[in-house]
Amino acid sequence: MTTEELISLELFCSHQGVEIAFVHALHERGLLQITVVQDRSFVAPEVLPHIEKLARMHYELDINLEGIEAISHLLERMERLQSDMRALHERLRLYEEG
Protein backbone atom coordinates (compact mmCIF):
# COMPACT_ATOMS: atom_id res chain seq x y z
CA MET A 1 0.00 0.00 0.00
CA THR A 2 1.46 3.38 -0.96
CA THR A 3 1.35 6.50 1.19
CA GLU A 4 -1.17 7.99 -1.25
CA GLU A 5 -3.62 5.27 -0.18
CA LEU A 6 -2.94 5.80 3.54
CA ILE A 7 -4.40 8.42 5.87
CA SER A 8 -2.08 10.68 7.84
CA LEU A 9 -2.49 9.95 11.54
CA GLU A 10 -2.01 13.66 12.32
CA LEU A 11 -4.82 14.61 9.94
CA PHE A 12 -7.17 11.93 11.26
CA CYS A 13 -6.53 12.81 14.90
CA SER A 14 -6.99 16.54 14.36
CA HIS A 15 -10.32 15.99 12.58
CA GLN A 16 -11.61 13.45 15.10
CA GLY A 17 -10.29 15.10 18.27
CA VAL A 18 -8.26 12.03 19.20
CA GLU A 19 -4.84 12.25 20.79
CA ILE A 20 -2.02 10.88 18.64
CA ALA A 21 -0.50 9.35 21.79
CA PHE A 22 -3.72 7.37 22.31
CA VAL A 23 -3.55 5.89 18.80
CA HIS A 24 0.13 5.05 19.28
CA ALA A 25 -0.74 3.34 22.58
CA LEU A 26 -3.34 1.23 20.74
CA HIS A 27 -0.67 0.31 18.20
CA GLU A 28 1.80 -0.65 20.95
CA ARG A 29 -0.81 -3.00 22.41
CA GLY A 30 -1.35 -4.62 19.01
CA LEU A 31 -4.89 -3.31 18.58
CA LEU A 32 -4.19 -1.61 15.25
CA GLN A 33 -1.52 -1.26 12.59
CA ILE A 34 0.34 2.01 12.00
CA THR A 35 2.66 2.51 9.03
CA VAL A 36 5.59 4.89 9.55
CA VAL A 37 7.15 6.54 6.50
CA GLN A 38 9.87 9.17 6.94
CA ASP A 39 8.93 9.76 10.60
CA ARG A 40 5.25 10.29 9.71
CA SER A 41 2.55 7.90 10.90
CA PHE A 42 -0.21 6.64 8.62
CA VAL A 43 -3.16 4.27 8.92
CA ALA A 44 -5.10 2.37 6.27
CA PRO A 45 -8.57 3.77 5.47
CA GLU A 46 -10.26 0.50 6.44
CA VAL A 47 -8.86 0.85 9.99
CA LEU A 48 -10.53 4.23 10.63
CA PRO A 49 -13.90 2.86 11.86
CA HIS A 50 -12.03 0.59 14.28
CA ILE A 51 -10.00 3.52 15.64
CA GLU A 52 -13.19 5.57 16.00
CA LYS A 53 -14.86 2.73 17.93
CA LEU A 54 -11.89 2.38 20.28
CA ALA A 55 -11.71 6.16 20.75
CA ARG A 56 -15.41 6.27 21.69
CA MET A 57 -14.80 3.57 24.29
CA HIS A 58 -11.97 5.62 25.75
CA TYR A 59 -13.29 9.18 25.54
CA GLU A 60 -17.05 8.71 25.92
CA LEU A 61 -17.18 5.67 28.21
CA ASP A 62 -13.93 6.37 30.13
CA ILE A 63 -12.58 2.87 29.51
CA ASN A 64 -8.82 2.64 30.04
CA LEU A 65 -6.42 0.99 27.59
CA GLU A 66 -6.40 -2.30 29.49
CA GLY A 67 -10.20 -2.42 29.35
CA ILE A 68 -10.22 -1.55 25.65
CA GLU A 69 -7.72 -4.33 25.01
CA ALA A 70 -9.84 -6.87 26.91
CA ILE A 71 -13.07 -5.75 25.20
CA SER A 72 -11.43 -5.87 21.76
CA HIS A 73 -10.19 -9.41 22.28
CA LEU A 74 -13.59 -10.54 23.53
CA LEU A 75 -15.35 -8.92 20.56
CA GLU A 76 -12.94 -10.60 18.12
CA ARG A 77 -13.54 -13.95 19.81
CA MET A 78 -17.30 -13.44 19.71
CA GLU A 79 -17.17 -12.61 15.99
CA ARG A 80 -15.13 -15.78 15.31
CA LEU A 81 -17.60 -17.88 17.29
CA GLN A 82 -20.54 -16.36 15.42
CA SER A 83 -18.83 -17.10 12.12
CA ASP A 84 -18.18 -20.69 13.20
CA MET A 85 -21.79 -21.04 14.29
CA ARG A 86 -23.05 -19.78 10.91
CA ALA A 87 -20.81 -22.29 9.14
CA LEU A 88 -22.08 -25.11 11.36
CA HIS A 89 -25.70 -24.09 10.74
CA GLU A 90 -25.02 -24.20 7.01
CA ARG A 91 -23.46 -27.67 7.28
CA LEU A 92 -26.38 -28.87 9.38
CA ARG A 93 -28.85 -27.52 6.82
CA LEU A 94 -27.04 -29.46 4.08
CA TYR A 95 -27.28 -32.69 6.10
CA GLU A 96 -30.96 -32.13 6.86
CA GLU A 97 -31.74 -31.55 3.18
CA GLY A 98 -29.67 -34.50 1.99
Image (cartoon, rainbow, N blue to C red):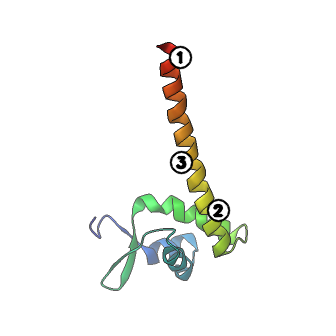
Find the distance from the CA under tag 2 to the CA under tag 3. Answer: 14 Å
The residue type indicated by label 3 comes to Arg
Q: Label 2: how many residues lie within 10 Å, few (<14), some (14-19) or many (20+)?
A: some
- Label ID, residue 71: 2
Give percent across and percent down for residue 28: 50, 78
Looking at the image, do the residues carrying marks 3 and 1 touch, with CB atoms under 8 Å apart?
Answer: no
User: Residue visible at 43% across and 58% down?
Assistant: 46
Instruction: Tell which circle, 3 or 1, labels the residue nearer the N-terminal end.
Output: 3
Q: Give, as a three-letter code, the residue at label 2.
A: Ile
Quadrant where the N terminus sits is bottom left
In-front residue for pair 63/46: 63
Q: Which mark is residue 96?
A: 1
Seen as rendered, the residue at the extreme top is 98
C-alpha distance separating marks 3 and 1: 24 Å
Counting residues from the start of the chain, the first of labels 1 and 2 encountered is 2
54 and 88: which one is in front? Answer: 88
Residue extending furthest toward the right: 61
- The residue singled out by tag 3 in the image is 80
User: Callout 1, which amino acid?
Assistant: Glu
Q: Give the Cα distance between marks 1 and 2.
A: 37 Å
Could you say where residue 18 lies in the image, as x and y percent from the top left?
57, 75
Residue at the spot 48% in from the left edge and 71% down from the top edge: 12
Query: Viewed as shown, does residue 67 lie left or right of 29?
Result: right
Query: Mark 1 or mark 2: which is in front?
Result: 1
Q: Position of residue 90 (x, y in %)?
A: 50, 27
**Which of the two marks, 3 or 1, is nearer to us in this view?**
1
Q: Residue 45 carries which label?
A: none
Position of 77 compared to 39: left or right? right
Asked which secondary structure carries label 2, the reply is helix
Where is residue 56 shown, x and y percent of the image? 64, 65
Q: How crowded is mark 3: few (under 14 residues within 10 Å), some or many (20 or more)?
A: few
Location of residue 72 with respect to 82 vertically, above or below: below
